Image (cartoon, rainbow, N blue to C red):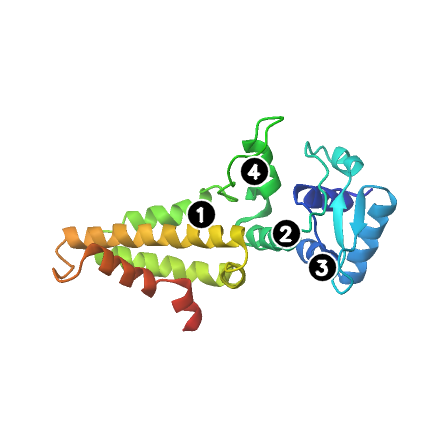
Amino acid sequence: MTARDREIVRWIGRLRMATAGEVAERFGLGRAVSYARLNGLVRLSLLEHARIFHASPGVYLATRVGLASVDLALPPSRVDLRTYEHDLELSTLVVELEREFGAERIATEREMRAADTPVGQAPVEQPRFAVPLAGARAAEIAAVEATADGPAQVRAWVSMQARRNPRVASLARTLDQSRHGDDPATAAWRDRTANRMRRATAVVQRLRREGRVHRSWTTAQAATLVWELVSFRAWDAS
């Protein structure tokens, strides 16, 4: 088994499952090469292949042997029809997050659940964060906070969003489209919009302290306006 093979087994093991297309995208492989590597790992009993729906691509899962070979202390995952689409969407989400933040900074849902759940107990709540708030992201937020006044903070925030939105566009569109029929996607969308509303409220409160918000506007109304102006949908429609 090559070093790349180990990387593939480990990446799939950290997820519940992945398609050959997702593996090809994640590791920069051609489809034919991806299938050849994956089928070789199946023959070595490091991965297993499952085709659930005739018209859909099959999925690959790490076996117990495969998990042990890459030192992953996680149980083998199994295909669950109740969460099948969700599990595949999570794999695509991890690819997007790794592209934006770097693979070394991403924790998968399986890893977060394992870290948050005592041995022998069922998880009691949904994991909340896939990426630690550190590095460049934290520096950007600190720069927004350090602006001289309210208008400068608005400009800095809009500038930060304009830089970030192209990097997360495909992920944001996926969440927006799937959130109405998928509870985890709904939770993720609400978490992101709630964070942005908290930021908008803080900005408006600063503007009000500086006497820059007309008395006819409540803080909630002004914050909603700011939130709408810097929303992903407003950027995406421009």
At mark 4, the secondary structure is helix
Residue bearing the label numbered 1: 136
Relative height, residue 73 to residue 40 (above, below): above
At mark 2, the secondary structure is helix
* Amino acid type of the residue tagged 4 in the rendering: Met
Residue 134 coordinates in the image, percent (x, y): 45, 42
At mark 1, the secondary structure is helix
At mark 3, the secondary structure is helix
Q: Residue furthest bottom?
A: 238
* Amino acid type of the residue tagged 1 in the rendering: Ala
Task: Compare residues 29 and 111 and report the one nearer the observer.
Answer: 111
Earlier-in-chain disc, 2 versus 3: 3
Earlier-in-chain disc, 1 versus 3: 3
Count of numbered labels shown in the rendering: 4
Earlier-in-chain disc, 4 versus 3: 3
Earlier-in-chain disc, 4 versus 2: 2
- Distance from disc 2 to disc 3, alpha carbons, whole Å, reads 11 Å
Residue bearing the label numbered 2: 91
> Mark on residue 21?
3
- Distance from disc 4 to disc 2, alpha carbons, whole Å, reads 14 Å
Task: Compare residues 193 and 134 and report the one nearer the observer.
Answer: 193
Residue 191 coordinates in the image, percent (x, y): 43, 50
From where the camera sits, is residue 105 visible?
A: yes
